Image (cartoon, helix red, strand yellow):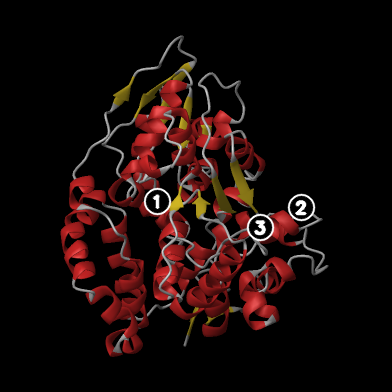
Amino acid sequence: MSVQGHSGRAFDDHNAPETELIEDCVHCGFCLPTCPTYALWGEEMDSPRGRIVLMRAGLEEGSEMSDVMATHFDRCLGCMACVTACPSGVQYDRLIEQTRPQVERNYPRTRSERLGRRASFALFTHPNRLRALIPMLALARRLRLDRAVAEGPLGRRWPRLATLASLAPDVRPREAISRLDECTPAAGERRGRVGLLQGCVQRAFFGATNAATARVLSAEGFEVVAPASVRCCGALMLHTGYEDEARSLARRAIEAFESCDYVITNAAGCGSAMKDYKHLFVDDPEWSERASALSDRACDVTELLGSIQPRAKRHPIALTVAYHDACHLAHAQDVRAQPRALLGAIPELEIMEPAEWELCCGSAGIYNLLQPEAARQLAERKVDNLLATGAEAIASGNPGCSLQIAGRLRSRGRELPIWHPIQLLDASLRGDGSAGGST
């Protein structure tokens, strides 16, 4: 199956991968050991430099968007570990973001593939829809139906259903109905006004993380504005190649946060997307300047807190924590030192470093639903490395990673707490030495 691109080649003329960016790649191979799919399969076309070869081919006259081309692009997690590893500064992040919409426009997806993507967006980008599922998820977990689906014949026949069942979070219904105040005043002298993106999955399944984020920012002197009207930043669509849908959600976020000194995220994928708004609207004369301004003010909560002198006193938490680097934080945003520094400033808390920190856990937005077997193998590898540290808990700065890792731990009969770094810092500021109050 193949389809001719509108321009007489695989890629159409709208924002095709840039030749100048492609030519930056010298095919040195430094990206290979950091690429999750190359680590799994050892296939050249499933490496960053191999996919760049395919991008170059897609620009050639007479080329076609073939099954092979679409398959290898689809298998990329978009984790950006290659960007961190590349000595030549290849902007693979820009290239894959330019390529994914080309695939969606010029490759004839099957009806079931289209429906799967649309269904994911219709659910995961709507926090109220996710909240409505929580009582059913709680009942299914009590009856162990989630385990039966994930590990039984239904899951074997439909791997995506097994993935959904394994990812089902353990959220108490009363937690799901809690709401974050839209404005939290600063404690003491005000340092600034920040907008907090509540997010979709984060808001529905990890409301405690948002509450902890607001408390810590307030304690450090920031007024926190968290508009409920911004239901999603568009990250899932942007990272899957659905640009129009991503822009629609991004415009709402841009409007809501224009009065803020900083726009704070506590989900790695969301932060990466908001910093990319400048690229998403680069050809839009009405929105490009406003989008660029928001991108320049967007930062992860650990990034902001790492740039200021702390005010609030840290109390001890006697705990060993394995720190998991979320790809869209460590690679896409280059935020690695700040969360470690914040955790390291908590007295008696010890940070454990797992092996292969640079390899993705397999979550990657909705990748674990679109490529369930590859995602499962990567999650198993990640959990092996986290457990090998002997830590008592895991710190993760992205909700997708937390769901993915927790699901694999449950499949092994292991229950290890997974907290966002900001929850541990919040527990320290409140003097909760067990960190139990942060969940």
Going from N to C along the chain, the mark reached first, 1 or 2, is: 2
**Which secondary structure, mark 3?**
loop
The residue that appears at 62% across and 42% down in the rendered structure is 340
Number of the front mark, 2 or 3: 2
Rate crowding at label 3 as few (under 14), some (14 to 19) or many (20 or more) other CA atoms within 10 Å.
Answer: some
Amino acid at circle 2? Gly
Position above or below: 51 against 327: below
Count of marks overlaid on the render: 3
Residue marked by disc 2: 89
Q: Check disc 1 and give the amino acid type.
A: Ala
In the rendered image, residue 335, in percent from the top left (x then y), is placed at 62, 43
Q: Give the labeled residue for mark 1.
A: 246
In three-dimensional space, the C-alpha distance between marks 1 and 3, rounded to whole angstroms, equals: 21 Å
- Disc 3 designates what residue? 18
The three-letter code of the residue at mark 3 reads: Glu
Please provide percent x and percent y for residue 343.
58, 39
**Residue drawn at point x = 46 percent, y = 37 percent:** 433
Instruction: Report helix, strand or loop for mark 2.
Output: loop
Q: Which of the two discs, 1 and 2, sits closer to the camera?
A: 2
Q: Foreground: 304 or 54? A: 304
